[in-house]
Amino acid sequence: MSWWRGTVGRRIWSELLYVLLAAPLGLLGFVVIVVSFAFGLGLAVTFIGLPLLALNGRVARAFGNVDRRLARRLLGLEVPDPRPFRSGRGLFGWLQAALRDPVSWRARAYLVVKLPLALIGFHLALAFYGLGLFWLSYPLWWQLSGPGTLYKNVFLDPGTLVFRGHDAPHRQVAHQLTVHYGDHAYVDTWPRAVLLMLGGVALLLLAPGVVRGLAALHRLLIRGLLGRTRGDERVRELEAARTQVVDDSATTLRRIERDLHDGTQAQLAALALTLGQAKEKLEHRPDVPFDPEGALDLVGLAHQHAKEALVELRDLARGIHPPALDLGLDAALATLVARSAVPATLHADIPSRPDRAIETIAYFSVAELLANVAKHSQATKATVDVGMKDEMLVLRVRDDGVGGARIGGGSGLLGLRGRVRAVDGELMVHSPAGGPTVVDVQLPVHS
Amino acid sequence: MSAAASKRPVLRVVLAEDAAIFRDGMSRLLADRGHEVVAVVADGEALVAAVDQHLPDVAVVDIRMPPTFTDEGLRAALTLRRRHPEVGVLVFSQYIETRYAAQLLGDNSAGVGYLLKDRVAETSDFVDALTRVAAGGTALDPEVVTQLMAVGQRATTIGAVLTRRESDVLGLMAEGRSNAAIAAHLVVGNGAVEKHVANIFAKLDLPASGDDNRRVLAVLRYLNG
C-alpha cells in the first residue's frame, strides 16, 4: 500500500532526519558565515579583511558541499556538483577568484535563506511527531502519575503539560500529570483523554505530509542555490557536444584514411605493379622474355583496376561531401532515397534553405537512418518526410520493419543523436517490438 | 647482373597482405618470374604460422593488417626475425616510419628489407630487392634511408666527420647498392666510389674483414652514433 509506505516507509524517516538535522547545521552555518562575513566586511580596510572574506566564501562553499551531500543521502536529491573552485595565480589570484566565485556567493545566500526554513521545519516536525506521540500515549502518563499538586504557569505549549512549575500551587488533582488548555479545559476525564488520543492519531497521520512538504522546500532551495546555474549547465552541454564533434571528425578522418589506404591506394599500387610487369614484357629485357600477348592481358587487367579505383574514389568523395547537396537538401535527399537499398519515397517541403551545416547533418542523418533500415529492420519500404516548423527542420524516417530499434543498441543511433544534439537538435526513436520504426529528427534551421 | 639472372634461384615466398587486389598482383608477378608463392595470408598471426610451417626463403609483409590496422605486420616481422633468423623478411608499407625501420634493423640487418609499396611499380627492382633479402642481404627504400640519415645526422656526432659526398655514398650503400651501382647513380668512376667507401670504413672504425656485412654495419654505426 503506497499510503502506508508513505507514512512509515524508510524514505519518510530519512526525510525527517534531514529536516531535524537541517536546524543545527543551518544554525551553525548561518552563525559562522554571517559573523565572519561581518568581521571581514568591518576589517575590509585593513589587510586581513579581504582574506577573511575570501576564506568566508570557501567555508560557505564547504557548508554547501556538506548540505548537498546530506541531501543526496537523505533526500535522494541528485544535484550535480557546481564547478570546482579555480584559483588564479599566486595569493592575489586566489584572493580574487575566491571573492568573485559565484558558487560561494550562492552558498552564502543559501545559508541565509536556509536558516528560517530549517528552524521552522525543525519545530513543525517535532510538534507533529512529538505532540502526536504524546497525545496518543497520554492516558498512560496520566493514569500512571500519582496524585499531587498542579502548578500553574508551566512551560511547553501548546496545551499546558504540567510537570513542575515555579508559581504557587494551583489546585489539587487526582493525577499529577494532567494536560489543560486554558484555565478550565483540564483533560482529567476518560472521554477527554480519548479525544486527546484521537487528536494524537490525527497529528501522526498528518506528520508525514508536513515532513514531505518541508523536505520539498529544502530540495527547492538546494537545487536553486547549491546546484549548477543554467549557464553552467549550458557550458557543460556545449563541452559535451564539442567533445562529440571532435571525436566524430577524428573518427571520420580515420575512416577516410582507412578507405584510401585499403581501397584506392592498394588499387593504384596494384595498377602500377601490373603496368610495370606489362612494360617489362615489351622491353626485350635479358631477364624477362618478350611477350606482347601477356603484356596485353596485363594491360587489360590494369584497365580494370583503374576503373575500379575510379568508382571507389567517387564513392569516397561522395561520403565526404555529396555533390547533390550543393543543389539543395531536397535534391540531395532525392538522390539518396533513389539509391536506398530498401525502396523508399520522399516527401520534402522545404520552403527556405537551412544553413549548409544543418543541411549536411540532415543529409547524413537520413543516409544513416536509411542504412539502418536496410541493415536491421527487414522492412519492405520506407518513407522520408522533411518539412519545416517553427524555425526547425523536421525529418521523419519511417519503415514497416520489425521494430525494436533503440538508442545505444549498436545501431549508430547514439552517435547520430550526439551529432544532432551538437547543434541543439533532437533525435527521437519510436520503435516498439514488431514495428513499425519511426525516427524523428529536429534540427534548428540556423545553427 | 645477366649472369645472375640466367641462374636466378627459385624463391619460396610467403605473402602477408590484406588487400586482395595487391596480393593477387604480387602473386602473379612472382609466379611470372618463376618464383613459388607457398602461402598467402592476411594477418600477422597467420603469417607466423605459415612461416613456421613452410620455412620459406623470404616473407613479404604488409605492416598494416587486421585486426587493428596499425603495425601488426611489423610485430609479426619482428617475431619472425627472432624465431627464424634465416628467413628473409621484406616489409611493405604505404608510409615510411623511421621508428619501424630502426626496430626492424635492430642490431642485425641481414635478410631484412623495408620498402614503400610504390616500389613494386618498378617490378624488376622489386624482384631484385626480394632476391637480395632472401639471400641474406638488405634492401632499404631510398625514402627510409633519407629519413634515417636525417634523424641520424641530428642524433650523432659522427655525422660531422663524413663529407657530404661520403654521406651520399653511405645512403646509397644503405639501400643495398653495389659500388658499381653507386658509381652509376652518382655519375662518377668506380675508383672514386671505392675511395669514398674506404674513407667511410676508416672513419667509422670498421677494419677490413671478409665479412660482406661491413657495408650495412657502416650504415648502422653511422645511424646509432
Image (cartoon, helix red, strand yellow):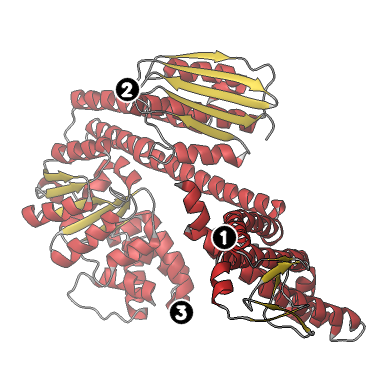
Q: Amino acid at mark 1?
A: Leu
Q: Which residue is mark 1?
A: A75
Query: Image quadrant of residue B143?
Result: bottom left
User: Mark 1, chain letter?
Assistant: A
Residue drawn at 56 percent across, 32 percent down: A361
Q: Which residue is mark 2?
A: A378
Q: Nearer the viewer, residue A407 or B137?
A: A407
- Give the structural element (helix, strand or loop) at label 2: loop
- Give the structural element (helix, strand or loop) at label 1: loop
Q: Which residue is mark 3?
A: B157
- Give the structural element (helix, strand or loop) at label 3: loop
Image location (x, y in percent) of residue B41: 18, 45
Image location (x, y in percent) of residue A321: 53, 30
Query: Image quadrant of residue A146?
Result: bottom right
Image location (x, y in percent) of residue B213: 22, 70
Residue drawn at 60 percent across, 28 percent down: A359
Farthest residue in the right direction? A45
User: Mark 2, chain letter?
Assistant: A
Query: Image quadrant of residue B221?
Result: bottom left
Image location (x, y in percent) of residue A426: 57, 35
Q: Amino acid at mark 3?
A: Thr
**How packed is label 1: few (under 14 Cα within 10 Å), some, or many (20 or more)?**
many
Alpha-carbon span between mark 1 and mark 3: 71 Å
